[in-house]
Image (cartoon, rainbow, N blue to C red):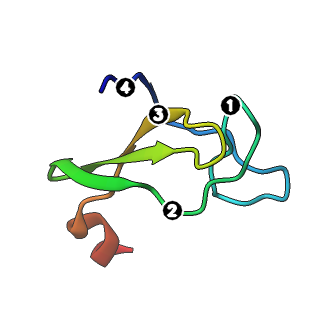
Amino acid sequence: MSAVAEVSSKPRSASRGSDRPVCQVCADTMVVAEASAFLSDNVVSHLWSCETCGYGFVTKHSLKPRSELSAA
């Protein structure tokens, strides 16, 4: 089985101001990532797969180090 995925740091979100990504093929809103993984200490990656059309993509997000969070 083969899969094609697109990597995006900012998934398109629903127009209601939601942080949920929207499928770029069929415009369905996705609720939960299929999988997530820590790539390094400050980077997390999410695999999204649209239940309606099957389109998949990966997002990567940089997290603030704990030292920055406790200093605020």
Amino acid type, mark 2:
Val
User: What SS does tag 2 mark?
Assistant: loop
Q: Position of residue 7 (x, y in %)?
A: 43, 27
Q: Which residue is mark 1?
A: 24
Residue at x 84%, y 50% (from the top left corner)? 15
User: What SS does tag 4 mark?
Assistant: loop
In-front residue for pair 23/69: 23
Earlier sequence position, callout 1 versus callout 4:
4
Separation (CA) of disc 3 from disc 2: 13 Å
Residue at x 64%, y 37% (from the top left corner)? 53
Q: Which residue is mark 2?
A: 32
Q: Left or right: where does residue 63 sit relative to residue 6?
A: left
> Pointer 1 and pointer 3: residues touching (CB < 8 Å)?
yes
Amino acid type, mark 1:
Gln
Of the 4 image quadrants, the one containing the N terminus is top left
Closest to the camera, between mark 4 and mark 3, is 4
Residue at x 24%, y 60% (from the top left corner)? 65
Amino acid type, mark 4:
Ala
Amino acid type, mark 3:
Phe
Earlier sequence position, callout 3 versus callout 2:
2
Separation (CA) of disc 1 from disc 4: 16 Å
User: What SS does tag 1 mark?
Assistant: loop
Q: Left or right: where does residue 9 sit relative to residue 38?
A: right
Q: Which residue is mark 3?
A: 57
Q: Residue furthest left?
A: 40
Earlier sequence position, callout 1 versus callout 3:
1
Relative to 54, residue 63 above or below:
below
> Pointer 4 and pointer 3: residues touching (CB < 8 Å)?
no
Separation (CA) of disc 1 from disc 3: 10 Å
